[in-house]
Image (cartoon, helix red, strand yellow):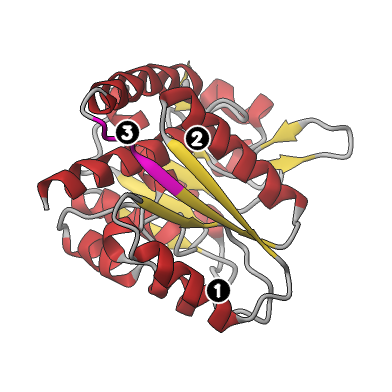
Amino acid sequence: MILLDGKSLAQEMQESIATEVQQLSTHGIIPSLAVILVGNDPASQTYVNMKARACKQVGITSILHEMPKNITQQDLITMIENLNQNDKLDGILVQLPLPKHIDTYEILESVCPQKDVDGFHTQNSGKLFSGVKGFVPATPLGIMTLLKHYNIELQGKNVCIIGASNIVGKPLGALMLNKNATISICHIHTQNIQFYTKNADIICVAVGKPNLITKDMVKEGAIIIDIGITRLESGKIVGDVDFAHVAPICSYITPVPGGVGPMTIVSLLRNTLESTKNRLNR
């Protein structure tokens, strides 16, 4: 069994990104990212802080816009439209989830596709499903980068993805389909998930339910990508896979933490840098 070490790969990528950012800065060009945080959800604040810290480490300017929980949808859209018009701003990220009174789809659609470094705008998701270059959501992009780094071939493989969100499951499925894998996407209404997992060469799980994937659901030699993350009452952070019992029968598996999480952050940095390069070429 080999651990897919996202932490060390992300560190290597951060160093490479930092070098590119430094080269751009010698020409007076500083990549910049605007992060919008609505309300005071503790988990969202933690994620925003992690992104800001990572930006600082590579020299990307990160600007946090903290909005009250009761902001109106129109006021939020107006603010995003103003950011869209800022020629020196390369990326706009709206931290999810948003308060229930706000239509998340409308907010994400108001972000300029050229600055949509989260890859959530339908223009970018449409490009992804069509196999055309565009911004790809950070978590699926990070997973694909990790698999490529370990020379894991996707062509002809049976892949089971558990979790059908627009943020992870669906775009990850599209990326793997574009690499000629055969995809099954399971969700809350799927009957007998074990049928799909037992036949899978690669299992990707993004649910947020500890020990959802157990040893009896996995075939010998399978590759496990554990995307879920849960903090137990004890303070321990775990994924969706019963790691202690599943890992010994796998060929590769991501640890939690230290697997997909760091790759998500560095992929956001990479998207922001790509947006800067696109700006210079427009």
Q: Earlier in the sequence, mark 2 or mark 1?
A: 1
Residue marked by disc 1: 76
Which disc is residue 260 wearing? Answer: 2
**Residue 280: quadrant of the picture:** top left
Look at the numbered disc 1 and give the secondary structure of its residue.
helix
* Badge 2 density bin: few <14, some 14–19, many ≥20, Cα 10 Å: many
Q: Please name the residue shown 33% across and 35% down the image.
A: 30
Q: Please rate how many residues cluster around mark 3, counting C-alpha atoms within 10 Å: few if below 14, some from 14 to 19, many from 20.
A: some
Which residue type carries mark 3? Thr
Give the label on residue 151, or none.
none
**Residues drawn in magenta:** 28-33
| Residue 145: mark | 3
Residue 176 visible in the shown view: yes
Q: Quadrant of residue 240?
A: top right
Mark 2 vs mark 1, foreground winner is 1
Q: Secondary structure at mark 2?
A: helix
Question: Mark 1 is on which residue type?
Answer: Leu
The image quadrant of residue 217 is top right
- Indicate whether residue 57 is drawn in magenta: no
Mark 1 crowd level (few <14, some 14–19, many ≥20, 10 Å Cα) = some
Residue extending farthest to the left is: 281
Q: Vertical placement of 15 versus 175: above or below?
A: above
Looking at the image, tell me whether mark 2 or mark 3 is earlier in sequence order.
3
Disc 2 to disc 1, C-alpha distance: 31 Å
Q: Nearer the viewer, residue 49 or 153?
A: 49
